[in-house]
Each structure stands twice: as structure tokens, then as C-alpha cells.
Image: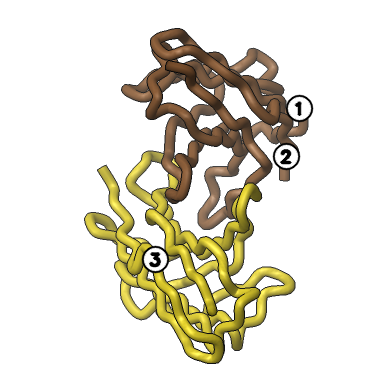
């Protein structure tokens, strides 16, 4: 399984963009890059995933480096509700592969 | 979007009793569900993979007789913590694959178990 490196914590101000980096230099060619987040005392929540091209959805954007060894989750305008732990997880598209959870990045959003 | 409903959200039980936690996929079928345990300030730890109609696959170090998993239908998996002890107190989370495009997983809201 590919190993990931994320900053332990980051801080942002409300209404400002946030760029959350993740290094996954050992990712295999068939691994998708998934991002999940976990708000306090809740189960994780799917954010976004991608393979090679940048991806956008209503929650965030995912920028994937050309060599796929890193990616960046972009929250365009942080809100207080975005305060959570963000996890990036490489995952093969095969059936029933297990999510391997690192420590993620704890994002604090200041009002 | 896909929803996984987990109940109860919070439970307090006495030592020696058993507690059942339910995990339901509400709008999609889940042949496979996953059970996690999470200690405070720590990451999620996979306990077992629950397969509909067959035995669960437990991760190394997880006692199968202590954490009974049943996945009798495509929408329901249960985790029973048997003969609970204070050290079993934790946050338990289930998830199911599906509803989020290729390879995406949907999670329940978690169950806070406190054994007194």
C-alpha cells in the first residue's frame, strides 16, 4: 500500500482558500487518490477522488501532480464547518480494497 | 447521495454485557461493509471486513469471538461487542463501498461506546 505524508495541522481564516497537500510518492499507476474528512465526533465523509486529471465537485477541487506523486485538496472558501481532519488515501479500484488511514491533517478555521 | 445509517450513536453499558451496533445502507446495496475502531486523537483502525452471506474477515489482533459480525442482508451489518469491558470503550464506525463513484466509501456517523 502506498504511504502518504500530510502536514499534521493547518490553519485558515474563514472565506479564504485552503490548499491541503499530500505526498504519495509510492503510489501505483492504478491507485485512485481519495480524500475524506472527519468532523469531530462523526464518521468520515467522502470529499473527492481522482486518478490523473484534476477534479472538481461541489465540496472541493483536487489537483493531481503530473507525476501523481502528490496531490492538493483545495477548499475554495473555507467555512467554520470545514474544520476537520482531512485524509488522503491512495486506493486501488479493485473490489473491496481496504482504506488505510494515516493521521491526516487537522484543519482549523478561524472566524 | 448514498447514506449509511448507524445506530445507536451513543451507548453506555455495564461490564460483562453485550452491545449490538447496526449499520444499514439506506439507498444502495452493500455486499461488503467495514468496521473500524477509533481511539481519541487517533486514526481509524480497521477491525474487520463484513461480507454479505459469509464470514467476516478480521484484521490481525482483533478477537473474532469478542467482536461478532453478522451481515445477513445486502443492507445490514451488525457488530456485537460481547462481554464488554472498559477497555472496549471506543468510537466504532462502519462503512460501505458504494454511492460515491468508482471505489468511493460511505460511512456511518459512528457509535460512542462507554463500558462502565
Examine the rendered structure and indicate whether residue A63 appears above or below residue B19: above
Q: Residue furthest left?
A: B27
**Residues under numbered marks 2 and 3 in contact, where contact means CB atoms less than 8 Å apart:** no
Which of label 1 and label 3 is nearer to you?
3
Residue hosting label 1: A25
Query: Chain coloured brown: which letter?
Result: A
Quarter placement of the N terminus of chain B: top left
On residue A95, which mark appears? Answer: none
- Indicate the colouring scheme: by chain
B55 or B108, nearer to the observer: B108
Residue hosting label 3: B10
SS of the residue under disc 1: loop
- Crowd tier of the residue under label 1, counting other residues whose Cα lies within 10 Å: few below 14, some 14–19, many 20 or above: some
Examine the rendered structure and indicate whether residue A45 appears above or below residue A18: below
**Residues under numbered marks 1 and 2 in contact, where contact means CB atoms less than 8 Å apart:** no
Q: Residue furthest front?
A: B116
Q: Residue at x 59, y 84 (%)?
A: B66
Q: How far, Cα to Cα, is label 2 from label 3? A: 34 Å
Q: Residue at x 55, y 36 (%)?
A: A85
Let me know if marks 1 and 2 both belong to one chain: yes
Residue hosting label 2: A2
Q: Residue at x 29, y 48 (%)?
A: B2
Query: Chain coloured yellow: which letter?
Result: B
B24 or B43, nearer to the observer: B43
Could you say where residue A53 lies in the image, as x and y percent from the top left?
A: 51, 17
Image quarter of residue B72: bottom left
Sequence order check, earlier mark of 1 and 2? 2
Position of B26 compared to B15: left or right? left
Quarter placement of the C terminus of chain B: bottom right
Amino acid at each position: 500500500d502506498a504511504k502518504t505524508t500530510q502536514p499534521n495541522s493547518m490553519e485558515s481564516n474563514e472565506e479564504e482558500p485552503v490548499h491541503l497537500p499530500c505526498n504519495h510518492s509510492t503510489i501505483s499507476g492504478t491507485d485512485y487518490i481519495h480524500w475524506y474528512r472527519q468532523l469531530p465526533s462523526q464518521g468520515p465523509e467522502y470529499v473527492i477522488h481522482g486518478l490523473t486529471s484534476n477534479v472538481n465537485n461541489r465540496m472541493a477541487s483536487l489537483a493531481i501532480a503530473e507525476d501523481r506523486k502528490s496531490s492538493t485538496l483545495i477548499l475554495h472558501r473555507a467555512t467554520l464547518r470545514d474544520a476537520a481532519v482531512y485524509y488522503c488515501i491512495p486506493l486501488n479500484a479493485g473490489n473491496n480494497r481496504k482504506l488505510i488511514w494515516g493521521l491526516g491533517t487537522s484543519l482549523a478555521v478561524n472566524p | 447521495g448514498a447514506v449509511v445509517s448507524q445506530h445507536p450513536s451513543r451507548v453506555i453499558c455495564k461490564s460483562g454485557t453485550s452491545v449490538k451496533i447496526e449499520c444499514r445502507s439506506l439507498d444502495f446495496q452493500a455486499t461488503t461493509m467495514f468496521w473500524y475502531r477509533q481511539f481519541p486523537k487517533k486514526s481509524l483502525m480497521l477491525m474487520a471486513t463484513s461480507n454479505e452471506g459469509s464470514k467476516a474477515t478480521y484484521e490481525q489482533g482483533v478477537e473474532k469471538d469478542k467482536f461478532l459480525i453478522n451481515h445477513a442482508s445486502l443492507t445490514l451489518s451488525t457488530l456485537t461487542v460481547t462481554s464488554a469491558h472498559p477497555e472496549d470503550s471506543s468510537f466504532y464506525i462502519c462503512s460501505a463501498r458504494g454511492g460515491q463513484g468508482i471505489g468511493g466509501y460511505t460511512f456511518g456517523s459512528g457509535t460512542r461506546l462507554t463500558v462502565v
